[in-house]
């Protein structure tokens, strides 16, 4: 879509910026990347009253233009980089009317960059209720910008805001806030002259951020560094001076335009809720209760839709088998690609429900209370209160969770969180655990209500959290911190969740999951299918020849004969050869070459395991039906001993392997993307594989 | 007297900071000299603490609070 005007949304966290963005753009949005950095770039389109189309860019929430985390550093870059084609024509600064003072700090910084600005004054309904009286006309006049009161939640004032965007000035007319040049007069003058800048605040920001912004050449950046030394510029002192000056400007402005009720407020509702939710004992009990309810619901509510999705795929596969001529290509499409895809699609309900919960927990403000309660505990093991969010998200999928670690400002805390998040039992491990537990753990109740299979599964989840914490502690001892950690975080007031946002997050995350996992599954299915369908040299021809001898036709009925041929072919295929090659290495864990093939293919994505098992045990018809795979695996016997292949020891050894091994190409890719260094995914892959092998070996030998 | 020494419910007024790096971050969040701070609660495990400052609630660790000197 071609945009006529480019608008950037800027604001503090928790001001309703995303809600406004969703309201302005609807589902008409996409997530891309800012050039050179990994921060998600959310853009969408909105049609203005005069028919023009505005491209809206949602920039990460920040308290100031001085970045404290990776996400925030993008805000200045986007606003300031005038060589870039993505430079906004207009900035809409969203300001929380109930918290004007702190919100205006960011506004004055943005305004001083001299880009045309509009203020969207959000939550005016709440500020009026709290008795805050804002003289909006005077406020707008003093700042020299249009101020539009809105309520993003109640979708009020949005039309007025669109109108203001339509009639926005092409040039910046806002009144100056502070005397920027007074902060570092000579340095600002010199940088402005050498880089030919006309804006003193831009020059000052470059002095602070020249090392991180992408649009300066190394020569320019080095020259700024030289100038800073020459004029003995101290970045933090300058920031302190600037902040104090800005707040003094804001205090003067608010004194004239805003009346806040004199009387001390009664205890707010938020405070009352906090007394319960962050209570010494109750707080933790409630948190555990919330987690328990979340997992119960994920399993309970997703069972029915998952079954239906499975049925749908089985129906499609069966129909295609009937319609298409039998042959290798049909096999690839129907059993390989579709079979693999259905293995991913059945997770949609679980992913959607989990993200609904996470989005509700974040939206209501409860997640920041959990962060508040857990910080001390998490710090002991080298993590941070903010690590709780990715760790809980890890139960769904490590990929978005690792991306969410960007909110952790401290480098070491963030790295450790990234390193241990993939240990948490993600939804891709679930079908493997379910399958193996169903094979070896009796479906019986103990202690009245507890189902043994359910207990085993819960055990795997708890075990994963414990191992993540132990590994985090180990990393805490090994890694050297580069900077001091700190934990200065807003605790937003409790609010009702915005159901639109919840629904949007369910849709958005499920889509991302399907696209990301779908690609891997299709690729792996095709490769595995080729490897399993062809063999080196003339081995396949020899097998065909062997079974053509008359004694086989006499002994076996046609179906059994076909199966005998297929299984011998598999053993001699490239995949089979590969399995035999690694068999000596995995035999101590109790695995045979067939499991070996599944292990190899699972390194692309864990959920491939079930599909591979299905292919290998050549199940007729529905390659994706877990029941039939389960039956086949249950009846598989060891050729030498006649014992079942999947004994208790083998099943638990396998589960241990899947609990620890880094078998997910998407996670490896996202860790690289987030750390911008191959060392981290390599270390992660290595330590997880070693742990997987050791835990597997231990489990097998203890249970054998 | 530093902010970390206040008990829940007590009020103090910011005088100055002992740490420049921390002060820049705290001031951006509204903890400025002259501003009044009320301690609203302390986390169940004794750290961090939650304070009310310039009309909203902020959470910070005891160590960070100890860099804020009160009048």
Image: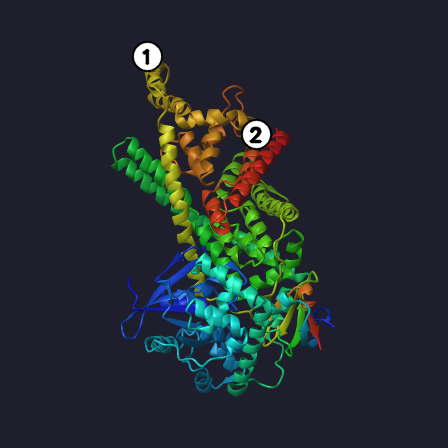
- Decide if residue A67 is in sight here: no
Image quarter in which the C terminus of chain A is found: top right
Q: Chain of mark 2?
A: A
* Mark 1 surroundings: few (<14), some (14-19) or many (≥20) residues within 10 A: few
Picture quadrant of residue A19: bottom left
- Relative to A448, residue A96 above or below: below
Determine whether, in the image, residue B45 is placed left or right of residue A170. Answer: right
Residue A678 point in image, percent of width and height = 50, 44
Q: Chain of mark 1?
A: A
Determine whether, in the image, residue A129 is placed left or right of residue A467. Answer: left
User: Which SS class for mark 2?
Assistant: helix
Q: Which residue is mark 1?
A: A550
Picture quadrant of residue A144: bottom left
Residue A220 point in image, percent of width and height = 46, 61
* Mark 2 surroundings: few (<14), some (14-19) or many (≥20) residues within 10 A: many
Residue A596 point in image, percent of width and height = 48, 30
Q: Residue at x 41, y 48 (%)?
A: A516
- Relative to A300, residue A490 above or below: below
Q: Residue at x 37, y 69 (%)?
A: A7
* The label number, if any, that marks residue A589 in the structure image: 2
Image quarter in which the N terminus of chain A is found: bottom left
Front residue of A410/A44: it is: A410
Determine whether, in the image, residue A543 is placed left or right of residue A268. Answer: left
- Decide if residue A369 is in sight here: yes
């Amino acid at each position: 879509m071609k945009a006529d005007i480019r608008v950037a949304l800027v604001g503090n966290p928790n001001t309703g910026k995303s809600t406004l963005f969703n309201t302005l753009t609807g589902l008409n949005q996409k997530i891309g990347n800012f050039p050179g950095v990994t921060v998600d770039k959310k853009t969408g389109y909105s049609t203005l009253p005069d028919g023009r189309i505005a491209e809206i860019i949602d920039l990460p929430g920040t308290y100031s233009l001085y970045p404290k985390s990776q996400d925030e550093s993008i805000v200045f870059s986007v606003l300031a980089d005038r060589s870039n084609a993505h430079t906004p024509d207009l900035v809409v600064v969203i300001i929380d009317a109930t918290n004007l003072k702190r919100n205006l700090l960011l506004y004055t910084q943005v305004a001083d960059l001299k880009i045309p600005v509009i203020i969207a004054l959000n939550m005016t309904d709440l500020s009026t209720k709290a008795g805050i009286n804002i003289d909006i006309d005077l406020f707008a006049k003093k700042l020299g910008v249009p101020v539009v009161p809105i309520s993003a939640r109640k979708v009020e004032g949005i039309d007025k805001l669109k109108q203001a965007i339509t009639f926005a000035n092409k040039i910046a007319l806002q009144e100056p806030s502070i005397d920027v040049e007074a902060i570092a007069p000579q340095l600002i003058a010199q940088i402005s002259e050498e880089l030919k800048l006309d804006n003193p605040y831009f020059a000052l920001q470059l002095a602070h951020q020249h090392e991180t912004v992408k649009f300066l050449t190394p020569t320019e950046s080095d020259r700024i560094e030289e100038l800073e030394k020459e004029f003995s510029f101290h970045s933090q002192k300058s920031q302190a001076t600037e902040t104090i000056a800005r707040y003094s400007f804001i205090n003067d402005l608010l004194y004239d335009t805003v009346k806040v009720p004199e009387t001390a407020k009664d205890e707010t509702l938020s405070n009352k809720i906090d007394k319960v939710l962050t209570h010494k004992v109750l707080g933790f009990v409630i948190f555990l209760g919330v987690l328990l309810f979340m997992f119960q619901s994920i399993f309970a509510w997703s069972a029915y839709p998952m079954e239906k999705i499975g049925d749908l795929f089985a129906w499609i596969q069966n129909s295609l088998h009937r319609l298409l001529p039998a042959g290798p290509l049909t096999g690839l499409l129907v059993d390989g690609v579709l079979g693999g895809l259905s293995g991913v699609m059945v997770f949609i309900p679980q992913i959607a429900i989990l993200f609904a919960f996470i989005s509700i927990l974040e939206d209501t403000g409860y997640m920041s209370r959990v962060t508040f309660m857990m910080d001390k505990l998490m710090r002991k093991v080298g993590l941070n209160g903010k690590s709780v969010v990715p760790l809980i998200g890890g139960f769904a999928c490590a990929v978005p969770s690792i991306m969410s670690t960007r909110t952790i400002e401290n480098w070491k805390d963030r790295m450790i969180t990234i390193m241990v998040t993939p240990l948490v039992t993600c939804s891709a491990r679930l079908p493997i655990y379910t399958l193996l537990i169903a094979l070896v753990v009796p479906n019986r109740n103990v202690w009245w209500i507890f189902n043994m299979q359910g207990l085993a599964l819960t055990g795997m989840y708890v075990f994963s959290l414990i191992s993540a914490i132990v590994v985090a502690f180990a990393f805490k001892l090994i890694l050297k911190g580069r900077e001091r950690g700190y934990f200065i975080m807003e605790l937003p007031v409790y609010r009702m969740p915005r159901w639109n946002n919840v629904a949007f997050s369910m849709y958005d995350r499920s889509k991302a999951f399907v696209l990301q996992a779908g690609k891997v599954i299709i690729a792996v299915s095709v490769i595995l299918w080729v490897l399993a369908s062809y063999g080196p040299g003339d081995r396949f021809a020899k097998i065909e020849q062997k079974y053509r001898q008359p004694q086989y036709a006499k002994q076996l009925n046609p179906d059994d004969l076909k199966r005998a041929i297929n299984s011998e072919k598999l053993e001699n295929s490239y995949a089979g050869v590969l399995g035999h090659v690694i068999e000596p290495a995995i035999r101590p864990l109790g695995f045979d070459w067939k499991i070996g093939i599944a292990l190899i293919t699972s390194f692309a994505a864990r959920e491939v395991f079930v599909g591979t098992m299905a292919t290998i045990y050549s199940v007729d018809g529905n390659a994706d039906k877990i029941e039939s795979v389960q039956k086949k695996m249950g009846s598989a016997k060891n050729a030498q001993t006649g014992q079942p292949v999947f004994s208790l020891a083998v099943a638990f050894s396998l589960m241990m392997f899947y609990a620890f091994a880094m078998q997910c190409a998407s996670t490896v890719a996202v860790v690289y993307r987030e750390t911008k260094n191959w060392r981290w995914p390599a270390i992660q892959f290595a330590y997880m594989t070693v742990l997987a092998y050791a835990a597997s070996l231990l489990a097998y030998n203890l249970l054998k | 007297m530093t902010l970390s020494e206040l008990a829940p419910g007590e009020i103090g007024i910011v005088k100055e900071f002992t740490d420049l790096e921390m002060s820049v971050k705290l001031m951006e969040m509204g903890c400025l000299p002259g501003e009044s701070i009320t301690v609203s609660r302390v986390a169940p495990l004794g750290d961090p603490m939650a304070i009310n400052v310039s009309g909203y609630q902020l959470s910070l660790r005891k160590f960070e609070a100890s860099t804020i000197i009160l009048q």
